[in-house]
Amino acid sequence: MPATSFYAQAEFDEQLRVNPLQDVDVLDEDAEEAGDEPIDQDAAETDDADQAAKLQKNASRRTTDLVRLYLQEIGRVRLLGRDEEVSEAQKVQRYIKLLELRSTVASQEEGLIGRFVHLIEVRDRLAAQLGHKPSLERWALTAGVSDVPELKRIMAEGKRHWAELAEMTVETIERIQSEGVEAKDHMIKANLRLVVSVAKKYQNRGLELLDLIQEGTLGLERAVEKFDPTRGYRFST
């Protein structure tokens, strides 16, 4: 599973559980009922400290629960054998070569393929900012395209031009893309145990285990893209 959605949902749930406005309303009601009765400052500070300690304890417990669920999930994915590893890595590299071809051509011309790549880059930036896929309308507006039909036209023609450059059919491009994405996800999921194992060694150095796992997962994604199966090494090494 993608790490971003995992952590974003956990943070959002935490925000809903701890609602500071609710505490303010309760304090205001108590103050009205008490009238001019003096407030025990020491008692208030003690209550605040107790509340903070309770929130910290609850957050720690939730973090532990999240880690436990995460470990259970990745534990269900079996490790890849040598032949499987090579096969999946080859699919990833095949797709990366197509992406490199597209980027090279886009950097040399400002025509259709250039606009095609520009639209993809805009979409990626929007998705990163929003935390989810942008709507076609917002995508078109941000990219400076007149409307959604024009956006779809550029994307369709751009893919056809990409296929022509690669001397392939659009169907072949789409198949290689699908296989490459699935293979990358498979390699990542099958090696997340390694990320957790390394993260545990550093968890007492000022970072939470979940943060370490997230950083490690990003590194794992980059490693999958760079892995060359022709060198004869196992991915884990």
Image (tube, rainbow, N blue to C red):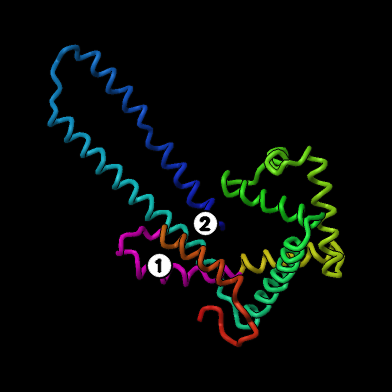
Is residue 194 at all visible to an observer of this figure? Answer: yes
- Label 1 and label 2: CA atoms lie apart by 15 Å
Residue 118 at x, y percent in the picture: 71, 52
Residue 57 at x, y percent in the picture: 29, 47
Region in magenta:
187-210
What residue sits 26% from the left and 40% below the top?
52
Identify whether 112 is placed above or below 56.
Answer: below
Residue wearing tag 1: 199
Residue 197 at x, y percent in the picture: 42, 71
Residue 14 at x, y percent in the picture: 41, 42
Residue type indicated by callout 2: Ala
Residue type indicated by callout 1: Ala
What residue sits 60% from the left and 46% below the top?
132
Residue closest to the eye, 225 or 99? 99
Q: Secondary structure at mark 2?
A: helix
Identify whether 52 is placed above or below 165.
Answer: above
Please, what is the dominant secondary structure of the magenta stretch? helix
The answer to whether 135 appears left or right of 47 in the picture is right
Identify whether 66 is placed above or below 229.
Answer: above
What residue sits 76% from the left and 52% below the top?
115
Rendered-image quadrant of the N terminus: bottom right
Which of the 4 quarters of the picture holds residue 103?
A: bottom right
> Is 197 a magenta residue?
yes
Q: Secondary structure at mark 1?
A: helix
Residue wearing tag 2: 3
The answer to whether 169 appears left or right of 200 in the picture is right
Residue closest to the eye, 111 or 172? 111
